[in-house]
Image (tube, rainbow, N blue to C red):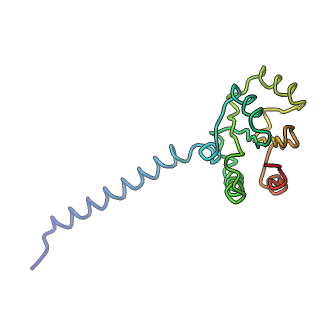
Amino acid sequence: MEIPKKNYIIVFILFLIVVILTFIGASFYNNNIKQTSVLYKYIKNINTKELDQYIKENPSVVIYIGDKYDLSNYEMEEKLKNKIINLNLYNNFIYLNKDSFNEKYINHFNKLYNTNIDINNIPIIIIYNDGYISNIYNNVSLAVLRDINLGDIKW
């Protein structure tokens, strides 16, 4: 018995629909799911209004300042996320989006903590260790990340 040509056409149309839906799904994933920072989705996010109180309550914390929409640091953030997981430091990291900073708060922060952070040099990692800022890393890259020893912090 011969299979009618109509059945071949139906199978071909179904195949095209599946391929098109696959491309639409991949496009949606790339445009919506993957468009934010790895760390923004993974560690606790706070804003500048909460930062001073958070630091008072947590004598040792790592502050990551980045731009949640800048994907140029994706590989570095992925490596940092893996470090956080391996050292079980999830609760000791906070994420601040650079958009929450204004000039007034930057001046306040620099004066209060005797620092000189420049919000234009993101990503920035600030290690607040045992009540004091022990290190500030500007323009963090994969090379800089290799030199940061998170195991030395007094948790």
Q: Position of residue 46 (x, y in %)?
A: 66, 34
- Left/right placement of residue 123 relative to residue 10 reads right
Q: Which residue lies at the image location 64% right of the left edge and 41% below the top edge?
A: 44
User: In which quadrant of the rendered view does residue 66 lie?
Assistant: top right
Above or below residue 42? Residue 18 is below
Q: Position of residue 138 (x, y in %)?
A: 83, 42
Q: Residue furthest right?
A: 114
Q: Which residue lies at the image location 87% right of the left edge and 43% below the top edge?
A: 135
Q: Quadrant of the N terminus?
A: bottom left
Q: Position of residue 123 (x, y in %)?
A: 75, 42
Camera-nearest residue between 70 and 93: 93
User: In which quadrant of the rendered view does residue 7 lie?
Assistant: bottom left
- Left/right placement of residue 19 relative to residue 88 reads left
Camera-nearest residue between 60 and 8: 60
Numbered circles on residues, count: 0
Above or below residue 13? Residue 44 is above
Above or below residue 9? Residue 150 is above
User: In which quadrant of the rendered view does residue 147 lie?
Assistant: bottom right
Camera-nearest residue between 100 and 94: 94
Q: Position of residue 116 (x, y in %)?
A: 88, 31
